[in-house]
Image (spheres, rainbow, N blue to C red):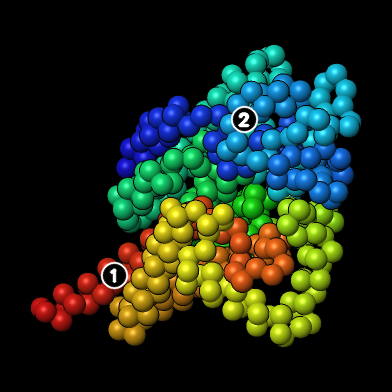
Amino acid sequence: MPVIVAMGTLLMGGVFMWHTAPGHIPDIWAHTYRISGILNGDVLARPVESTSRLHHSTENVGGHVDWSWINYSHEQDDGYDPTVVQLDSITASDASGADVPYNNTATNSPVSYLPQLAGFAIGKAMGLPAGTTYYLTETIMLVVYACCTAIAVALLPKWRILVGVVMLCPLLLHRYSFAISADSMTQALTFLLSCMLVRALFKRIGVGTYAAFAIVCLLLAMCKFIYTPLVLLTLLAPWIQRGMKVRASSHGGRAERLASAWRAGIWITALGNAAAFIWLAVWMKLTGWFVTTPMMVSHAQMAQRRQALFTDPGAVVELMKMMALSIVTGRSNLDRTLDTWLIRCCWLAMAIMALALIVATVRRTLNGYETAFWWCASIVMVGIILLTYVALWLQYTPAGSAMIEGMQHRYFLPLIVLGVLCTAESLAGLRLSRDRVIV
């Protein structure tokens, strides 16, 4: 199945890549500018005066971007992505490039763009045209994504076919298997971490796997901070493995090796989590002086809202009302009909997952370790989406709005594999319980 997933991803992702015109990925030019800026030394964004259709305030931040990418973005611009820089607004430039804004991607660390940085660096070193570099970079990202998904499926002790089919779903491959975007690497890593966690739930693991947990946790935190809570689930792995050790206690030497592994795992996963959250705190401190969409919410407004979260109960109640209304109606960014329906479907899928897990828990069809893990996983997944709404309220929702603006179905996608596995395990337990009753 891993080979099928890899080949299917390359084939289907390649077809989608070929048919997706340059510039038709959400925030594509902001991501492109960000990558070019990083290669030019602007790892941390700085104030710039130039503007775009999206960034048209006095609080713009960005970096120095090569003229090749600025010109290419204008050649391909058909109005789809509003982050393309307005040439007449550029005030700082030289022969190599100009300072352009990309607030909404400036919070992304270089790690979230590792495959894309490699593509851009190769293109620049070889003197390739921007168009050629663009497709080269997408191809590199697609290969990395295919490898991550294949490894993820190979790690699964069960449900390989189900997860493989999910990973080959066009909705997941359409853009984010190859896109020049932080979402691509994030989705690949969350799928990998999800399958690693499920392996630890059912199979004995060694110190090497715990070390891999720590590495993936740190990389995920360096991609998109909103998914960092997923790394907390790795702390359950040593506890689960300890339970396996007890059941294998009669095997003497083997039991001792298992005990040694899970004891080491406690420290390794703790260090991995600590590193992830320390990185998150440091990076948020370094990028906390600007906002992603200052034309909609200024930094001063964001600071007021953030303070209100901790000091004003009325503001919290109002936020909860806005969040509830946004969830019930499926409110989407720019009120796109398709996105609205997909958001509703994602919430429905989460409700089905929760219902299946509740019934499985009540009927005790899962053992104690599985029940605890899946409840923790479900809480973390729902929490991540709720935190996304809070983040959009803080930095994207204009004052006076009755609902939270900016939600998109793509924010649910990295959680799909873990959610499907939770639902599958719950339903499988219920089916087994029913079969036993019938017998």
Task: Count neighbours of disc 2 (C-alpha within 10 A) and say few if under 14, some if 14 to 19, many if 20 or more.
Answer: some
Name the residue beneath numbered marker 2.
77
Q: Quadrant of residue 290?
A: bottom right
The residue positioned 69% from the left and 70% from the top of the image is 400
Left or right of 174? Residue 65 is right
* Residue sitting nearer the eye, 119 or 294: 294
The amino acid type of the residue labelled 1 equals Leu
Question: In x, y percent, where is residue 204?
Answer: 44, 60
Camera-nearest label, 1 or 2: 2
Image: 306 above or below 117: below
Element carrying mark 2: loop
Instruction: Give the mark nearest the N terminus, 1 or 2.
Output: 2
Residue farthest to the left, as pictured: 439
Q: CA distance from mark 1 to mark 2?
A: 48 Å
Element carrying mark 1: helix
The amino acid type of the residue labelled 2 equals Asp
Question: In x, y percent, where is residue 186?
Answer: 57, 48
Is residue 6 something that shows in the picture? Answer: no
Question: In x, y percent, where is residue 407?
Answer: 56, 59
The residue positioned 60% from the left and 36% from the top of the image is 79
Name the residue beneath numbered marker 1.
427
Quarter of the image where the C terminus is located = bottom left
Quarter of the image where the N terminus is located = top left
Q: Quadrant of residue 221?
A: bottom right
* Residue sitting nearer the eye, 251 or 158: 158
The residue positioned 30% from the left and 49% from the top of the image is 161
Total tally of numbered discs in the picture: 2
Left or right of 19? Residue 159 is left
Image: 393 above or below 287: below
Left or right of 300? Residue 385 is left
Task: Count neighbours of disc 1 (C-alpha within 10 A) and say few if under 14, some if 14 to 19, many if 20 or more.
Answer: some
Question: In x, y percent, where is residue 206?
Answer: 51, 56
